[in-house]
Image (cartoon, helix red, strand yellow):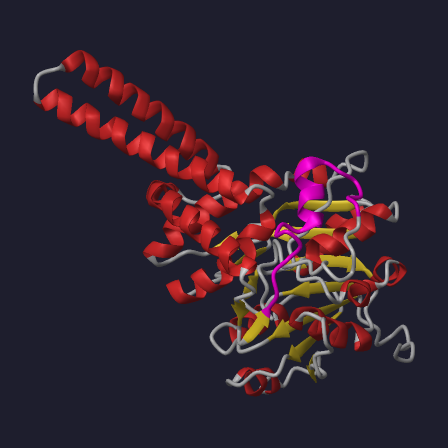
């Protein structure tokens, strides 16, 4: 641990930003962070062996509150993101630690407000699910479907309830008190886990401390993927680890798409042939199914125009889910030049605990355990 600073120069919060090949987004992220007000803070950017201009961009900030730290050599069995954030936590001086991704943009005043909210809620760990920025057709189709499923599986009301065993967090915005972080061993205790956000949240809740988790569109936004190739690689890495029954879920979403489309198509076809009674019945069925689908999508906080395109995301989601399972089964999962082995069977036991309500699932043998990344969607 670094020497304790004097009261006059100790920041209230240390913002830790792991960055691996993030030249497209890092400057906007840091611009939004250095503009924060009403709180003393430092920003620690960890350059995680980047091969682009990430390090140069981080070093270009003259603000004395911004420091650049190089991630150390990746130890065997550790994940890249955990190795990076551990390097930042080692030199952090704040009473609070904010772990946030390089593709986030923080709204004015959000840092001070988040600390005030955590204090008001008596939470040792506060996490926001950022507003998702989607621009391309692929993003608008797929992202609402995935986040609707996540919203159903990781309910903020349950996570924030001290009497519920459910625990979750979004690594894109994870604020934790330093004393709580140290008490549970920090990221060093979960260094081999790609699902580091959920694992850290579970450790905090098991320690008897409170979590506070909610949609944080009023505080932070992010654009996770900019190309279809990035989207496919990222969700191939994540999806099978987020949902306990990938085959069943993929089948249900394909069937939902088929029922909606076929009902509406039958309505149009039968009406054109003058069969109005079956046309009305088919149209009514299609309308009800589509309305139920839109209601589910809207709970994930996407705009109406994006939600309308999400119908085409149903088969795409199923494809990505199946691809994710097959890739993990064959040990062929890649993210930013790093290869990760398949998970345990394949679903992460930490996710199963959240979805099923099991407080502490049976521990698998160390030889088979390789928990994977979850809500944070791995930036390193």
Horizontal side, residue 184 vs residue 28: left or right: right
How many marks can you see?
0
Q: Nearer the viewer, residue 104 or 327?
A: 327
- The quadrant the N terminus occupies is bottom right
Magenta span includes 356: yes
Q: Is residue 39 above or below residue 289?
A: below
Q: Nearer the viewer, residue 10 or 376?
A: 376
The residue shown at (29%, 19%) is 284
Point out the residue furthest to the left here: 273
Q: Position of residue 267 (x, y in %)?
A: 20, 24
- The quadrant the C terminus occupies is bottom right
The residue shown at (61%, 58%) is 376
Q: Is residue 227 visible?
A: no
Horizontal side, residue 325 vs residue 43: left or right: left
Horizontal side, residue 201 vs residue 156: left or right: right
Q: Is residue 366 above or below residue 62?
A: above
Residue 37 occupies quadrant: bottom right
Q: Is residue 353 above or below residue 27?
A: above
Q: Is residue 74 visible?
A: yes
Q: Which residues are magenta?
A: 340-362
Residue 281 occupies quadrant: top left
The residue shown at (71%, 71%) is 78
The residue shown at (51%, 46%) is 147
């Amino acid at each position: 641990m670094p020497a304790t600073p004097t009261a006059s120069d100790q920041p209230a919060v240390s913002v830790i930003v792991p960055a691996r090949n993030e030249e497209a987004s890092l400057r906007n992220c840091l611009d939004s962070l250095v503009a924060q007000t009403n709180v003393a803070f430092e920003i620690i950017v960890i350059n995680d062996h980047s091969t682009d201009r990430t390090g140069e961009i981080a070093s270009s900030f003259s603000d004395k509150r911004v420091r650049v730290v190089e991630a150390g050599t990746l130890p065997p069995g550790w994940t890249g993101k955990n190795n990076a954030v551990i390097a930042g936590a080692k030199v952090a001086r704040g009473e609070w630690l904010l772990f946030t991704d390089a593709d986030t943009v923080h709204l004015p005043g959000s840092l001070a407000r988040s600390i005030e909210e955590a204090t008001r809620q008596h939470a040792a760990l506060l996490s926001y699910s950022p507003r998702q920025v989607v621009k391309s057709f692929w993003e608008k189709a797929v992202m609402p479907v995935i986040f609707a499923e996540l919203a159903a599986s990781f309910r903020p009301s349950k996570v924030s309830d001290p009497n519920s065993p459910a625990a979750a967090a979004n690594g894109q915005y994870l604020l934790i008190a330093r004393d709580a972080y140290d008490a549970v061993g920090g990221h060093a205790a979960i260094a081999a886990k790609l699902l580091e956000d959920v694992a850290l949240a579970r450790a905090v809740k098991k320690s008897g401390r409170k979590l506070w988790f909610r949609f944080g569109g009023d505080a932070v936004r992010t654009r996770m993927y900019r190309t279809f190739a990035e989207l496919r690689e990222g969700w191939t890495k994540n999806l099978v680890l987020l949902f306990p029954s990938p085959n069943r879920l993929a089948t249900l979403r394909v069937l939902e798409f088929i029922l909606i489309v076929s009902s509406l198509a039958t309505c149009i076809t039968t009406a054109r042939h003058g069969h109005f009674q079956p046309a009305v019945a088919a149209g009514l069925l299609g309308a009800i199914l589509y309305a139920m689908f839109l209601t589910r999508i809207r709970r994930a906080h996407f705009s109406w125009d994006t939600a309308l395109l999400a119908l085409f995301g149903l088969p795409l989601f199923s494809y990505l889910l199946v691809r994710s399972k097959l890739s993990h089964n064959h040990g062929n999962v890649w993210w930013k030049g790093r290869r990760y082995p398949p998970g345990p069977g394949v679903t992460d036991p930490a996710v199963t605990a959240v979805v099923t309500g099991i407080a502490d699932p049976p521990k698998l043998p160390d030889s088979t355990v390789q928990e994977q990344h979850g809500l944070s969607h791995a930036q390193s």
